[in-house]
Image (spheres, rainbow, N blue to C red):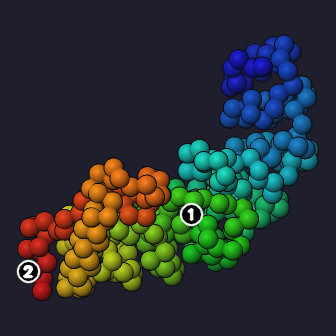
Amino acid sequence: MWEVRLQSNSIEVMRCLLEHSEVPSAKDIEPPHSLDQVKLFAEFGFDVKTEGHLLLEDVFDSRETFDWLLDQGADINRSDNSRITWGHELPPGEYDYSLGVLNNAAASGDIETFDYLVSRGANPLRSLALHHATRCQDAEKTKAMISHLLDKHNLDINASGGTLSLQKFILFIHGDDGAPLKCAVANQNMAAIEELLKNGADPNAIGDCLYSPWLPALKPLLEGGADSVGALFNAISENSNEAARICLECGADPVRAEELDQLKVEEAEKLAAKYGADEEDYKGMDDEMRTAKYGANEEDYKGMDDEMRKLLRDWK
């Protein structure tokens, strides 16, 4: 077994290691990969045809290395390499087989490179390119890439893990399966938020991000048609006066939000009566399932505080 993974930039050092080691596999090879490094791995038995696709997403911006891997038989549309998403390990049973090479190209904001990869056979419909374009922190590149992906490659602006065309490529049980707009909010990318909304993204297709959003995103989402009462209700629940004020300025109905808040108080009282405030006697669903359904401390909810109540009263 390898005691250290291959990450030296010295071809001579790598050759020495390879001469005294097992045949390298993709998991042994850390980026970045120069063409000379990749050729050396192949010389010592690395199987480009069966594992070369595992390196493609790391070398998408090095055309010489990328082309060599493809010319040696690496499959540009094979995507069984991804067991991580957004930098986090996926739990057992979840997977991300979206096309990482296009995801990373979209995140770079380099339209020319993205189109080159497509010209070499990469299928944009197997990617989450719109989602990953929101990782680009250059505002102009972000807007240009999103517009390009929509206009030239006809990607679905509201595609999510629940979209039928993507279900065979990704399965996330938790929050990463939202639409591109949700990713833009999560990545705190205002340029992406504005561009997606301008092009018709559904402002309500962002799940919990609407209710606990990056605060600068709240106003453009509401102005784009997001559920203002739902957002206000959650601002009340979290005692976020600033978020509540934004919702009210955007037309949220304070009376309806108060009604929803009172319903939540009543539900909390029922939960506390049924299960006990500390859940000591509860024998039903496990803690993880109950938290997902009711919230970590739902039975303790006592309603809005006095400052929030005054804010709503002033807006009536």
Q: Residues within 10 Å of mark 1 (few under 14, many from 20)?
A: many
Query: Residue 291 versus residue 44: which sits nearer the camera?
Result: 291
* Residue drawn at x 72%, y 44% as measured from the top left: 59
Q: Is residue 219 left or right of residue 95?
A: left
Element under disc 1? helix
**Residue at image coords 67%, 52%:** 93
Q: Amino acid at mark 1?
A: Asp
Could you say which quadrant of the image residue 36 lies in? top right
Query: In the figure, is residue 119 to the left or right of 151?
Result: right
Query: Residue 13: where, in percent of width, then height?
Result: 75, 15
Who's the residue at 29% across and 51% down the image?
A: 278
Residue 213 seen in this snapshot: no
Q: Which mark is first along the chain, 1 or 2?
A: 1
Q: Is residue 225 above or below residue 217?
A: below
Q: Quadrant of the N terminus?
A: top right
Q: Secondary structure at mark 2?
A: helix
Q: Is there a contact, CB below 8 Å, between mark 2 and mark 1?
A: no
Number of numbered callouts drawn: 2
Quarter of the image for residue 241 reads bottom left
Percent coordinates x, y for residue 62 in the rendering: 72, 44
The residue labelled by disc 2 is 314
Amino acid carrying label 2: it is Asp
Residue 177 spot, x, y in % from top left: 56, 63
Residue corresponding to mark 1: 177
Structural crowding at the residue carrying mark 2, measured as other residues with C-alpha within 10 Å and reported as few (<14), some (14–19) or many (≥20): few
Is 32 placed above or below 89 here? above
Can residue 17 be seen by looking at this rendering?
A: yes
